């Protein structure tokens, strides 16, 4: 196979080193997780490129590097000199120049801003336009492509631009597949596009000299636990227990024989009814809600007792709230409530972690078996029918929605490998299950990586770019599939007059948007909440 020797064209500021001065040149192109970089070794006779020399090269200069063969020498990178290093002996003088592409601008600024109800592409454009200053338009074509993701709220404080871009790229979806790539193209344009949506026009057929195929289980996870918002309640319908005197899970009664208890359709917070207790001739109103056998509530999982309460004017306002466990042991707490016959929200912390907030907690009280709730209010004065207490929207809350999904085949092959994720945007066990299934499908199998090297590739005017998809066939390894280019390195060795291209490739299962597991149409919308921490 006959190929042309490599050609280079390098410019730093107004300095254009001739190819004869270039000893070694490496350009590394990366995307999404890194920006591109370069390192060049130059002959530096008679302090030619030193400060004070004929053609000084200094840090801060912008430049470009073009590499190719024959008449085709396409631009590979527009760069910025970030470091110079002089290397000398008694007979030789060299200058090592290194830096990054214009993507280094992604690391200059931090962001303190809140984005609300913004599409992914809107946030990316705002960052690039107002914090980075890179063009994202080529010949009238917008290079920041649309997403199907709307972010309800993203709040950042002193957060690097690069970190925000990586978050959007990792969480935004398009047509049901999560994941975007971004890169600084050889012409210094910023591109943001769905992962695997760009295909290289090049072929590797019969041009691979060295290959290294790897398959590893480092990322494998085959038991996925997903926790959602801490808003799960017992009952799930938070008003169900105050819509009937005999709801599905329990029943209402009064402890004082003189009390009467009933449904009240005139005074309520939610739904059709509230629970109304009248003292009658008794001085105390003592409504009781008792859970059926098997419906006891575990306060360690549901650490909040929530309700609305209203008191008639003749109550002294000091309400004792008593919890009873399945064995009849009790824990008491006093609440001061205005006796203005208006609804007041009450949220009580319960469970062993909050036991100190309760008084008279009996020894060995079982917080995991809450059987009964009582309210004890003292009334004096007024006519009997006006001495009343109302309760509405009673529930135990604060539990996180959750789901655990496992793959036995993966566990048998690679051992049990767990992942726990907390996502505040998930508001049902079903949504947690969808998310867990999506993660399980994505992570249960090993990742595949491939490194190929060649000194005989002629890419013409279309260099390999990270983020592109390319087909690879390795018959001996039974590899015949599309891979995503993770990074590319162009290495020109002037001594051997070779251009070696090293391509790092990866292959993984697409991360499908969670809603695809629901087998029904659903708006493509992900609501993300994030408060970024200050970088150290």
Image (cartoon, rainbow, N blue to C red):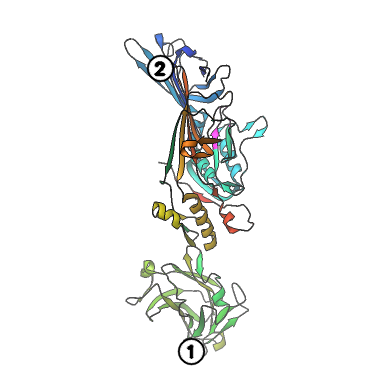
Give the foreground label among 1 and 2: 2
According to the picture, the residue beneath numbered tag 2 turns out to be 95
According to the picture, the residue beneath numbered tag 1 turns out to be 282
Marks 1 and 2, the one that precedes in the sequence: 2
Foreground of the two, 273 or 266: 273
Q: What residue lies at 49% left-to-right and 36% top-to-bottom?
A: 475
Report the span colored magenta: 182-189
- Note whether 88 is above or below 231 in the view shown: above
Please indicate whether residue 118 sits to the left or right of residue 65 in the image: right
**Toward which corner of the image does residue 201 lie, by quadrant?**
top right
Q: x, y (%) of residue 472?
A: 52, 35
Please indicate whether residue 364 sits to the left or right of residue 78 in the image: left
Q: What residue lies at 44% left-to-right and 13% top-to-bottom?
A: 49
Foreground of the two, 132 or 417: 417
- Whether the residues at callouts 1 and 2 have beta carbons within 8 Å, the answer is no
What kind of element bears circle 2?
Answer: strand
């Amino acid at each position: 196979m006959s190929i042309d020797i490599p050609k280079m064209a390098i410019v730093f500021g107004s300095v254009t080193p001739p190819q004869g001065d270039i000893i070694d040149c490496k350009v590394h192109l990366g995307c999404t997780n890194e920006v591109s970089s370069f390192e060049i070794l130059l002959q530096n006779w008679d302090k030619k490129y030193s400060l004070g020399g004929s053609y000084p090269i200094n840090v801060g200069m912008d430049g470009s590097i073009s590499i190719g063969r024959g008449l085709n020498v396409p631009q590979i990178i527009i760069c910025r000199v970030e470091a110079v290093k002089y290397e000398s002996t008694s007979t030789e003088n060299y200058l090592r120049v290194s830096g990054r592409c214009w993507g280094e601008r992604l690391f200059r600024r931090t962001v303190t801003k809140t984005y609300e109800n913004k599409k992914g592409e809107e946030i990316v454009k705002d960052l690039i336009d107002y914090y980075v200053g890179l063009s994202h338009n080529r010949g009238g074509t917008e290079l920041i492509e649309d997403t199907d993701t709307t972010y309800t709220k993203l709040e950042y404080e002193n957060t690097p631009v690069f970190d925000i871009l990586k978050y959007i790229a990792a969480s935004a979806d398009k047509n049901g597949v999560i994941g975007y790539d971004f890169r600084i193209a050889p012409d210094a344009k910023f591109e943001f596009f769905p992962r695997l949506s760009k295909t290289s026009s090049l072929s590797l057929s019969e041009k691979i000299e060295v290959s290294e195929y790897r398959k590893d289980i480092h990322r494998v996870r085959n038991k996925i636990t997903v926790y959602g918002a801490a808003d799960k309640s017992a009952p799930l319908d938070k008003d169900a227990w105050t819509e009937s005197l005999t709801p599905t899970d329990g029943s209402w009664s009064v402890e004082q024989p003189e009390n009467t208890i009933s449904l009240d359709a005139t005074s309520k917070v939610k739904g059709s009814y509230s629970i109304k207790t009248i003292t009658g001739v008794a001085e105390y109103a003592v409504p009781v809600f008792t859970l059926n056998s098997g419906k006891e509530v575990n306060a360690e999982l549901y650490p909040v007792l929530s309700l609305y309460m209203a008191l008639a004017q003749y109550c002294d306002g000091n309400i004792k709230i008593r919890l009873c466990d399945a064995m009849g042991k009790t824990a008491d707490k006093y609440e001061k409530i205005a006796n203005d016959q208006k609804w007041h929200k009450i949220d009580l912390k319960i469970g062993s972690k909050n036991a100190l907030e309760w008084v008279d907690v009996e020894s060995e009280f079982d917080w995991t078996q809450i059987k009964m709730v009582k309210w004890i209010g003292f009334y004096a004065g007024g006519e009997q029918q006006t001495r009343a207490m109302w309760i509405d929207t009673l529930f135990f809350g604060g539990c996180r929605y959750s789901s655990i999904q496992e793959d036995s085949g993966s566990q048998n092959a690679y051992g049990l490998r767990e992942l726990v994720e907390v996502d505040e945007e998930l508001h049902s066990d079903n949504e947690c299950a969808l998310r867990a299934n999506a993660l399980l499908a994505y992570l249960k199998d090993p990742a595949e990586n491939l490194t190929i090297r060649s000194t005989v590739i002629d890419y013409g005017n279309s260099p390999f770019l990270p983020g592109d998809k390319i087909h690879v066939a390795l018959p001996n390894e039974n590899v015949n599939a599309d891979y995503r280019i993770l990074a590319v390195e162009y290495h020109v060795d002037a001594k051997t007059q070779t251009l070696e291209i090293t391509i790092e490739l990866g292959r993984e299962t697409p991360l499908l948007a969670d809603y695809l597991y629901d087998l029904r149409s659903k708006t493509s919308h992900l609501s993300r909440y994030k408060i970024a921490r200050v970088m150290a």
